[in-house]
Amino acid sequence: MKTYSIVCAIVLAAMMFSGCSGGKEEKAEEKAAADTAQTAVVVEKIIVDDFNTGTKPNKLGGDLGAWDKDPKDETQTCIMTYDSAVKNGDSGYSVRLDYDVESPNPAYNGFWMKLENLNAAGYKNLVLFVRGDAEKGFTQKFKVELKSAKETGSYIVTGVNEAWQKIVIPLEKFVGLTDRSALTEMVIVFDDTNSTEKFGSINIDDIYFE
């Protein structure tokens, strides 16, 4: 009888342990599933501008335009226009940038867009479409900057050609920009150091974060 009681106690303890263990495993599995679901949340892309209206502001409500290092220096300039003849897609516009950094003076200019303190902390890439003007000529390289109130990160785009290209820039590649929670501005820079052609024209279209 005593032996029988001991055996029963052992069996009962084993069952209780198994039940507890199973509960822990189930909770662990539930937590893992929840973590996976949270990680799998798809972040929708944020369109900065597709330029399809041919007017300001951009899709974020921000201003945009061309800029020059020295507006008084007529040997260097950048002019922005909306271009309905050359665009990425069947309708709308792109932005055409006619630049000139062939100057006896230090020269740089380009294009800017306000980002209205965009929170891009949950995004991985900045995407833009680029095409060079075969007739007028174009640089194969230019700089892209992202700015916050306190930081500026930069990246050199290379390999521009006569066809539309989708340029995908990982945000972690913007050297100097550590906080992407409140972006104020995106800037395209043509300069006399990086530009492979000192004057020419490129078109920009469909800028977004993904």
Image (cartoon, rainbow, N blue to C red):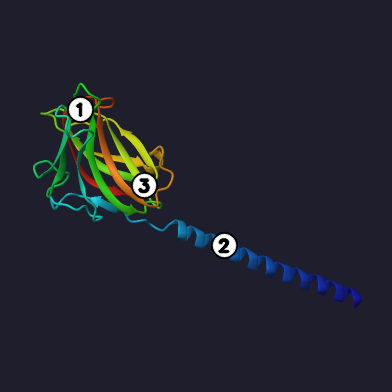
Give the amino acid at mark 1: Val
Q: Is residue 144 left or right of residue 74?
A: right
**Rendered residue at 81%/70% (across/down):** 10
User: In the rendered image, which residue does mark 1 sit on?
Assistant: 101
Seen from the viewer's position, the closer of residues 19 and 42 is 42
Q: Which callout, 2 or 3, points at the residue further toward the start of the chain?
A: 2
Question: What is the spatial separation of the Cα atoms under label 2 and label 1, in whole angstroms?
Answer: 61 Å
- Are there few (<14), some (14-19), or many (20+) residues within 10 Å of tag 3? many
Seen from the viewer's position, the closer of residues 52 and 25 is 52
Q: Is residue 210 above or below residue 164?
A: below
- Tell me where residue 138 appears, x and y as whole percent: 18, 29
- Tell me where residue 33 appears, x and y as whole percent: 51, 61
Determine if residue 130 is in view: yes
Question: What is the spatial separation of the Cα atoms under label 3 and label 1, in whole angstroms?
Answer: 26 Å
**Image quadrant of residue 79?**
top left
Q: Is residue 141 left or right of residue 38?
A: left
What label sits on residue 148 in the rendered view?
3
Q: Which callout, 3 or 1, points at the residue further toward the start of the chain?
A: 1
**Rendered residue at 86%/75% (across/down):** 4
User: In the rendered image, which residue does mark 2 sit on?
Assistant: 29
Looking at the rendered image, the disc whose residue lies closer to the viewer, 2 or 3, is: 3
Viewport quadrant of the N terminus: bottom right
Q: Is residue 123 left or right of residue 60?
A: right
Helix, strand or loop for disc 2: helix
**Image quadrant of residue 65?**
top left
Give the amino acid at mark 3: Ser
